[in-house]
Image (cartoon, grey):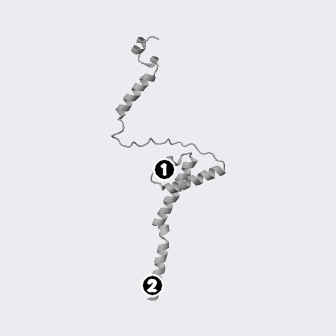
Amino acid sequence: MRLSQVLAGLLLTCLMAGCDQLGIETPQKAAEHQVAESKAIGSACRHAVRAIEDCYTLNPKADKSAVFAGWREMDEYMRENKLEGVTPVVPRPPPPSASKASAPSKADDEEDTSSADAADEPSASKSPKKAKGKSH
Protein backbone atom coordinates (compact mmCIF):
# COMPACT_ATOMS: atom_id res chain seq x y z
CA MET A 1 0.00 0.00 0.00
CA ARG A 2 2.81 2.37 0.78
CA LEU A 3 4.43 1.80 -2.64
CA SER A 4 1.21 2.70 -4.47
CA GLN A 5 0.93 5.98 -2.55
CA VAL A 6 4.54 6.90 -3.40
CA LEU A 7 3.93 6.08 -7.09
CA ALA A 8 0.72 8.09 -7.10
CA GLY A 9 2.58 11.03 -5.51
CA LEU A 10 5.35 10.81 -8.11
CA LEU A 11 2.83 10.63 -10.92
CA LEU A 12 0.97 13.64 -9.55
CA THR A 13 4.24 15.57 -9.21
CA CYS A 14 5.17 14.78 -12.81
CA LEU A 15 1.75 15.92 -14.03
CA MET A 16 1.94 19.17 -12.06
CA ALA A 17 5.42 19.91 -13.42
CA GLY A 18 4.07 19.53 -16.96
CA CYS A 19 1.39 22.21 -16.47
CA ASP A 20 3.76 24.90 -17.73
CA GLN A 21 4.31 22.94 -20.90
CA LEU A 22 0.57 22.53 -21.40
CA GLY A 23 0.09 26.29 -21.44
CA ILE A 24 -1.92 26.45 -18.23
CA GLU A 25 -1.34 29.94 -16.90
CA THR A 26 -1.24 30.68 -13.20
CA PRO A 27 -2.42 34.03 -11.83
CA GLN A 28 1.18 34.89 -10.95
CA LYS A 29 2.34 34.22 -14.50
CA ALA A 30 -0.55 36.27 -15.89
CA ALA A 31 0.39 39.23 -13.66
CA GLU A 32 4.07 38.94 -14.64
CA HIS A 33 3.07 38.83 -18.31
CA GLN A 34 0.88 41.93 -17.90
CA VAL A 35 3.70 43.87 -16.23
CA ALA A 36 6.24 42.81 -18.86
CA GLU A 37 3.86 43.77 -21.67
CA SER A 38 3.15 47.16 -20.09
CA LYS A 39 6.89 47.86 -19.69
CA ALA A 40 7.39 46.98 -23.35
CA ILE A 41 4.60 49.39 -24.31
CA GLY A 42 6.25 52.16 -22.28
CA SER A 43 9.64 51.49 -23.88
CA ALA A 44 8.13 51.52 -27.35
CA CYS A 45 6.34 54.80 -26.63
CA ARG A 46 9.56 56.47 -25.51
CA HIS A 47 11.45 55.15 -28.52
CA ALA A 48 8.68 56.53 -30.73
CA VAL A 49 9.11 59.97 -29.09
CA ARG A 50 5.64 59.87 -27.57
CA ALA A 51 4.88 61.62 -24.31
CA ILE A 52 3.95 59.38 -21.40
CA GLU A 53 0.43 60.87 -21.40
CA ASP A 54 0.03 59.87 -25.05
CA CYS A 55 1.15 56.39 -24.15
CA TYR A 56 -1.49 56.15 -21.43
CA THR A 57 -4.15 57.41 -23.84
CA LEU A 58 -3.20 54.99 -26.59
CA ASN A 59 -3.03 52.00 -24.18
CA PRO A 60 -5.78 52.43 -21.58
CA LYS A 61 -5.72 48.78 -20.46
CA ALA A 62 -2.00 48.72 -19.72
CA ASP A 63 -0.70 48.97 -16.15
CA LYS A 64 0.27 52.65 -15.82
CA SER A 65 3.07 52.14 -13.31
CA ALA A 66 4.70 49.47 -15.47
CA VAL A 67 4.25 51.64 -18.59
CA PHE A 68 6.01 54.50 -16.80
CA ALA A 69 8.80 52.17 -15.62
CA GLY A 70 9.39 50.97 -19.19
CA TRP A 71 9.25 54.52 -20.54
CA ARG A 72 11.74 55.72 -17.93
CA GLU A 73 14.14 52.80 -18.54
CA MET A 74 14.12 53.47 -22.28
CA ASP A 75 14.63 57.19 -21.68
CA GLU A 76 17.72 56.49 -19.55
CA TYR A 77 19.03 54.02 -22.12
CA MET A 78 18.53 56.45 -25.01
CA ARG A 79 20.22 59.30 -23.11
CA GLU A 80 23.21 57.15 -22.13
CA ASN A 81 23.73 55.93 -25.67
CA LYS A 82 22.78 59.24 -27.34
CA LEU A 83 20.06 57.63 -29.43
CA GLU A 84 17.39 59.56 -31.30
CA GLY A 85 13.80 58.39 -31.27
CA VAL A 86 11.86 57.16 -34.27
CA THR A 87 9.02 59.34 -35.54
CA PRO A 88 5.74 57.43 -35.15
CA VAL A 89 3.89 56.54 -38.33
CA VAL A 90 0.47 56.12 -36.73
CA PRO A 91 -1.14 59.50 -36.00
CA ARG A 92 -2.66 60.28 -32.63
CA PRO A 93 -6.33 59.40 -32.41
CA PRO A 94 -8.75 62.31 -32.05
CA PRO A 95 -9.62 63.06 -28.42
CA PRO A 96 -12.84 61.40 -27.28
CA SER A 97 -15.77 63.76 -26.86
CA ALA A 98 -17.10 64.20 -23.34
CA SER A 99 -20.67 63.53 -24.39
CA LYS A 100 -22.39 63.23 -27.70
CA ALA A 101 -25.18 65.59 -26.63
CA SER A 102 -22.82 68.48 -25.95
CA ALA A 103 -20.72 67.86 -29.06
CA PRO A 104 -21.82 69.82 -32.14
CA SER A 105 -23.34 67.78 -34.92
CA LYS A 106 -21.57 67.18 -38.21
CA ALA A 107 -23.99 69.51 -40.00
CA ASP A 108 -23.13 72.31 -37.56
CA ASP A 109 -19.42 71.74 -38.20
CA GLU A 110 -19.95 71.92 -41.95
CA GLU A 111 -21.85 75.21 -41.64
CA ASP A 112 -19.15 76.70 -39.43
CA THR A 113 -16.36 75.65 -41.78
CA SER A 114 -18.16 76.72 -44.91
CA SER A 115 -18.80 80.21 -43.55
CA ALA A 116 -15.23 80.49 -42.25
CA ASP A 117 -13.84 79.22 -45.55
CA ALA A 118 -15.94 81.71 -47.48
CA ALA A 119 -14.59 84.59 -45.42
CA ASP A 120 -10.97 83.44 -45.86
CA GLU A 121 -11.13 82.75 -49.60
CA PRO A 122 -10.17 85.46 -52.10
CA SER A 123 -12.94 86.61 -54.42
CA ALA A 124 -11.31 84.95 -57.45
CA SER A 125 -12.01 81.47 -56.09
CA LYS A 126 -15.71 82.22 -55.49
CA SER A 127 -18.39 81.57 -58.04
CA PRO A 128 -18.12 83.62 -61.25
CA LYS A 129 -21.35 85.56 -60.57
CA LYS A 130 -20.10 86.89 -57.23
CA ALA A 131 -16.59 87.56 -58.53
CA LYS A 132 -17.87 89.59 -61.52
CA GLY A 133 -20.08 91.74 -59.32
CA LYS A 134 -17.19 92.98 -57.18
CA SER A 135 -14.84 95.67 -58.35
CA HIS A 136 -11.51 96.40 -56.74
Name the image quarter holding residue 8: bottom left
Q: Decide: is 78 above or below 26.
A: above
SS type, badge 1? helix
Other residues around mark 2 within 10 Å, as few (<14) / some (14–19) / many (≥20): few
Residue at (57% x, 42% y) in the render: 87
Q: How many marks?
A: 2
For residue 24, say whether it is visible.
no
Residue at (47% x, 82% y) in the render: 7
Quadrant assignment for the N terminus: bottom left
Which labelled disc corresponds to residue 56?
A: 1
Task: Say whether disc 1 or disc 2 marks the residue closer to the N-terminus.
Answer: 2
For marks 1 and 2, give the CA distance.
54 Å
Residue at (58% x, 48% y) in the render: 47
Q: Give the amino acid at mark 1.
A: Tyr
Across and down, in percent, residue 116 comes to 42, 26
SS type, badge 2? helix
Select label 1 or label 2 by which is in front. 1
Across and down, in percent, residue 92 comes to 48, 42
Q: Give the amino acid at mark 2.
A: Gln
Other residues around mark 1 within 10 Å, as few (<14) / some (14–19) / many (≥20): some
Across and down, in percent, residue 119 comes to 43, 22
Residue at (36% x, 38% y) in the render: 103
Q: Tell which residue pokes out farthest to the bottom in this image.
A: 1
Which residue is at the front of the view, 13 or 120?
120
For residue 6, say whether it is visible.
yes
Q: Are marks 1 and 2 in contact (CB under 8 Å)?
A: no
Across and down, in percent, residue 50 comes to 54, 46
Which labelled disc corresponds to residue 86?
A: none
Name the image quarter holding residue 108: top left
Q: Tell which residue pokes out farthest to the right in this image.
A: 81
In the picture of the structure, the residue carrying the numbered disc 2 is 5
